[in-house]
Image (cartoon, rainbow, N blue to C red):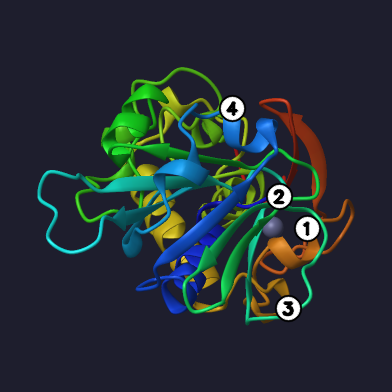
Amino acid sequence: MPELPDVALFRQFFRRTALGRTISSVEARDPLVVGSLGRRNLATELPGRTFRASRRHGKYLFARADPPGNARNRRPVWVVFHFGMTGSFVFLQPGAPRPSHARVVFFFRDGCSLLFVCPRRFGRVALVDRPEGLIGAKRLGPDPLSRGFRGLRRALSGRRGAIKAILLDQTALAGVGNLYADEVLFQAGIHPRAAAASLEQKRWGRLWRALDRVLRTAIEREVDAKGFPRAWLLPLREEGARCPRCAGRIARGLVGGRTTYFCPRHQKM
Ligand SMILES: [Zn+2]
């Protein structure tokens, strides 16, 4: 399931392929994918516009589509992408065969196209006036890699409950999902069920450094688990596996309704 690092890579892909290209038409027929997040019509509003900028907040990607020329009376619109469980992008050269499960297709004037592919249809594509509107409507918390992020303790302390459940709560912190929440707690040596309110200053610091490092490393290594450091939990999520940090046994449990892997030996309550 795409988390912050995956969406960061989708953004890189978008910038390499679709940025600077002018849309000639849009095919957006799946009402579940294009009608759930907003009701505006991509097929009528986007043709003639050019993708000029992008940004990411948590697991959402925003692409700014500007009108032609200096038409000051026409405002930019933003296409928002949420990748759900199985969403991804495919970029096609003219005439290339189309893969299955393409839910939205942006055709460009030069004959290339960008496809939002999503087999399980949990992904969403919509138009918004500006990203802040959607971020506010969804009550998304701050993005931990954004420039203005002021630290984990400031964002999360005061929340009640298990630290893992709070890391997953998108209204507290935007972008972290199940895999990276486990990884960060593993690296910080914090039990996933530890109460956030009980964490001392020192542990908040450790957690924040682990979160920042894990997210940045995952993006640098292109979210390929085979390329992740050997001391990480992510490539060996398996009950009974040897912990690469302390040689304890990896345990599996349920925290915040999600399957959780952790090492009870070095992740103390
Ligand atoms: Zn361990």
Disc on the earlier residue, 2 or 1: 1
Q: Which mark is nearer the camera, 2 or 4? A: 4
Q: CA distance from mark 3 to mark 2?
A: 25 Å
Identify the mark at residue 265; answer none if there is no mark.
Answer: 2
Disc on the earlier residue, 2 or 4: 4
Where disc 4 sits, the SS reads loop
Identify the mark at residue 226; answer none if there is no mark.
Answer: 3
Q: Residue at x 56, y 77 (%)?
A: 111
Disc on the earlier residue, 3 or 1: 3
Where disc 2 sits, the SS reads loop
Please name the residue that numbered disc 4 is placed on.
Answer: 36
- Looking at this view, is 3 or 93 the one in front? 93
**Does mark 1 have its CB less than 8 Å from ligand 1?**
yes
Query: Does residue 145 appear anywhere in the picture?
Result: no
Query: Does residue 142 appear anywhere in the picture?
Result: yes
Name the spot of residue 162 as percent of width and height, x first: 56, 26
Please name the residue that numbered disc 1 is placed on.
Answer: 248
Amino acid type at mark 1: Gly
Above or below residue 234? Residue 181 is above
Disc on the earlier residue, 1 or 4: 4
Name the spot of residue 132 as percent of width and height, x first: 27, 36
- Image quarter where the C terminus lies is top right
Q: Residue at x 34, y 63 (%)?
A: 50
Where disc 3 sits, the SS reads helix
Disc on the earlier residue, 3 or 4: 4
- Looking at this view, is 170 or 182 the one in front? 170
Amino acid type at mark 2: Arg
Q: Quadrant of residue 112?
A: bottom right
**Does mark 2 have its CB less than 8 Å from ligand 1?**
yes
